[in-house]
């Protein structure tokens, strides 16, 4: 393979990666938040509050929502050149921490 075909392959793979991050990240974000909100609403019912396993799933659902909001919000935005983690150091550190 020549260097021009290698460069073309790398450019097309970068484009596929950008498009994948842009649209699949939004899909995961929407369904993840909706699923975690539904889990939280169901697990907060009076009948399930006495079950320790339900409390564990409730806490995990809330922490998963926080993780999705912190980690996945900036991912699709970075493909449209609006990545807030490059301009705000606190958001960058918070995203890495969460």
Image (cartoon, helix red, strand yellow):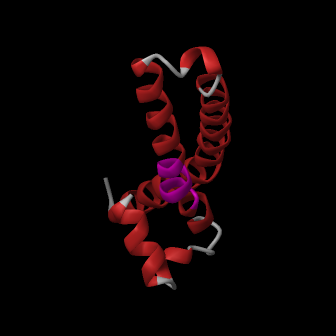
Which residue is depicted at the point 45% across and 27% down? 55
* Nearer to the camera, 90 or 16: 90
Residue sitting at x 65%, y 68%: 80
Instruction: Kindly identify the residue that appears in the image at 43 percent across and 64 percent down.
Output: 95
Judged by its main secondary structure, the magenta piece is helix
Left or right: 89, with 87 as reference point = left
Above or below, 42 relative to 58: above
- Residue 39 is situated, as x and y percent measured from the top left of the image, at 60, 27
Q: Nearer the viewer, residue 7 or 50?
A: 50
Magenta stretch: includes residue 31: no
Between 46 and 43, the one nearer to me in the picture: 46
Q: Which residues are magenta?
A: 66-73
Q: Position of residue 4 (x, y in %)?
A: 40, 64
- Against 20, residue 45 (above or below) is above
| Left or right placement of residue 85 versus residue 46 in this view | left
In the picture provided, is 95 more to the left or to the right than 80?
Answer: left
Identity of the residue drawn at 39% across and 58% down: 98
Task: Kindly indicate the quadrant of the structure image that contains residue 53.
Answer: top left
**Where in the figure is residue 23, as x and y percent of width and height?**
65, 47
The image shows residue 92, relative to residue 49, as above or below, that is: below
User: Disc count in the image?
Assistant: 0
Q: Nearer the viewer, residue 62 or 87?
A: 62
């Amino acid at each position: 393979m020549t260097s021009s075909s290698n460069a073309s392959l790398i450019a097309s793979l970068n484009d596929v990666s950008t498009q994948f991050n842009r649209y699949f990240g939004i899909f995961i974000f929407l369904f993840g938040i909706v699923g975690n909100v539904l889990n939280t609403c169901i697990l907060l019912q009076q009948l399930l509050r006495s079950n320790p396993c339900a409390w564990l799933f409730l806490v995990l659902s809330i922490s998963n929502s926080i993780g999705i909001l912190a980690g996945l919000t900036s991912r699709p935005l970075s493909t449209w050149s609006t990545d807030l983690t490059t301009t705000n150091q606190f958001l960058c550190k918070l995203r890495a921490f969460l």
